[in-house]
Structures are given as C-alpha cells and as structure tokens.
Image (cartoon, grey):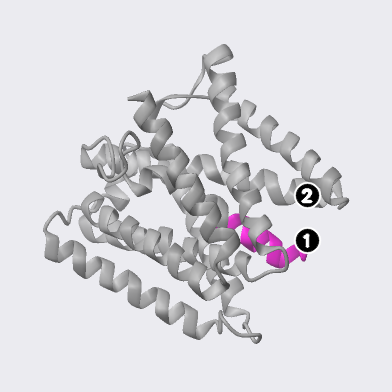
Amino acid sequence: MLKQRVITAVILALVFLAALFKLPLPLFSAFVAMVVLIGAWEWANLSGLPKAWQRAAYVGLIAALLALVAYSTHLFDDHSVNISKAILMVGCLWWAIALLWVQGYPGSAAHWGSRWFKVLMGVAVLVPTWLAFSFLRGQPSGAWLILIVVLIVACADIGAYFSGKALGKRKLAPAVSPGKSWEGFWGGVASCVALALVVAYLADVSVWATLLLIVPAGLASVLGDLLESMVKRQRGIKDSSALLPGHGGVLDRVDSLTAAAPVFALALSVTGWSL
C-alpha cells in the first residue's frame, strides 16, 4: 500500500508541476478545471446523487459556472474586473460559515445535511477554488505563488502530523476527524510560520506581510480537510472515490487546497503582496 501511495504521489506531483510551469494561463486553467470537474463528480456522490446521470448533470452545472466566471471576470485578458475579488470574498465568507458547522457537528447537520444543500455547498467549494488558481497563475510569478500555496498545505499537514503524533492529547474535532488534535493544529501553524519566514527571507519581502498571507491560508487548509471529512462522515463513506490508487479520490487530495487557495488569493489581491 505504501509503495502504491508513493508511486501515485510522485506521478501526481510531476503532472502538476509540468502543468504549472509549462502551460500558459488558459491551458493551465483548463487543467485545473478538469481536476475541479472530477471533484464535482465525486461531490455529487457525497451530496447523495449516486446515479451517473445525476452526477453528470452536476458536472455540467459546475462547468457552466466556471465558464460564466471566466467570462464575467475577463480572466484571460488584461482587463480583469473586481468581480474576481468579489467571488473570492464570497468563497472566504463561505468558509467562515463552514467553520461554525464543523465545530457544531453532528448537530449542525440539521442545517446543511439535505441533498440539495450539499449540492450548493459543492458550488461554494469548487468554483472559488478554480478561480483562485486561475487568478494566482495570472499574476507575475504566478506559478511560484501557486507553489507557495501547495507548500502551505504541505507544511500545515506535515507539522500537524508530527506534532500531533508526539504531543497530541486534546482532540480538535472528535466528531469529524478523531485523529486530529489541538497540539497537531498548533504544530501545523508553527510550520506555516517557519515557511513564511523562509519565503520572506528568500524573496526579500516584508516578514509581517508574508505572515499575514501564509498563516491564514494554513489555518484555512485545516478547515478544508475537516469539511470534506464531515461531509463524508455524514454520507457514511471513507473516500470520495477510488480514482487514485492508495489515495482515494481527487477531493481527498485537494480538500485542503479548496480552502487555502481562495484565502491566499484574496489576501494577495487585497495586500498587493508579490514576489
């Protein structure tokens, strides 16, 4: 199983890095859209839409929304309008609401547990994710900005794993993810702080501005993971699919990014921070 996981992870990393650094913005956005639409297929099942035609219809809905966002934001020309920032703000507001639901689970399922409400949740998760990646890729040094987002998620995850394993006692969200602890959470935050210091030093930019950009995205990444865990638990399944050998589904691999990327992109658009 471990060998299978490693091989899959290496292949995924190589494909992602090739797309990130070799594809122009429109093609990279199409690549991310493909990943998001696979996620939409899986989310439809999490929402309680297991039939193929229902899932296909949901994928079509998400695809149409991505096209509408691309058109309305002028994403691929030099005249991108403020609606990009507005959509990112709505996406980040959604995650603030999701935090309350994760904290209140299982009681909170009375508010969001219906099939059609989870369908809307998927829209709020997937569409801002695609916009965030496309928006970031269109910035100067955009590929490196996206790589920083990936490193944020990795640092938060690795720091949480090792500190949680060594020190973990107090459960972070026992009803959602029993394996996560507050000690692990703070270990992940510390890792993100260390990453911010390294980035600030290497890029010769403000330490405080870099911390304000990276740490909130790291905090959000934990929420992205917890939200998908909550929905899967309510649905009664372990993985979003079996598409990736040893890793489950696409959503299982990008759940943290769905929260971290919009938060990072919004912070970048507000602060004007750049490499």
> Is 224 placed left or right of 121 in the picture?
right
Residue shown at 53% from the left, 56% from the top? 18
Q: Disc 2 or 1, which lies upstream in sequence?
A: 2
Residue 92 showing in the rendered view? no
Q: Which amino acid does the dot numbered 1 rest on? A: Trp
Element carrying mark 1? loop
Q: Which mark is residue 30?
A: none
Residue that badge 1 annotates: 273
> Is 257 placed left or right of 249 in the picture?
right
Residue shown at 60% from the left, 85% from the top? 77
Residue 179 showing in the rendered view? yes
The location of residue 268, given as percent across then percent down, is: 70, 62
Residue that badge 2 annotates: 210
Element carrying mark 2? helix
Is-magenta flag for residue 95?
A: no
Q: Residues within 10 Å of mark 2 (few under 14, many from 20)?
A: many
Task: Name the dominant secondary structure of the magenta segment.
Answer: helix
Mark 2 vs 1: CB contact within 8 A: yes
Residue shown at 77% from the left, 66% from the top? 272
Q: Is residue 98 above or below residue 37?
A: above
The location of residue 74, given as percent across then percent down, is: 56, 84
Q: Residues within 10 Å of mark 1 (few under 14, many from 20)?
A: few
CA gap between label 2 and label 1 equals 8 Å
Please state which of residues 208 and 114 is positioned toward the viewer in this rendering.
Answer: 208
The residue range painted magenta reads 262-275
Please state which of residues 141 and 23 is positioned toward the viewer in this rendering.
Answer: 23
Is-magenta flag for residue 273?
A: yes
The location of residue 29, given as percent across then percent down, is: 49, 69
Q: Which amino acid does the dot numbered 2 rest on? A: Thr
Q: How many marks?
A: 2
Q: Quadrant of residue 263?
A: bottom right
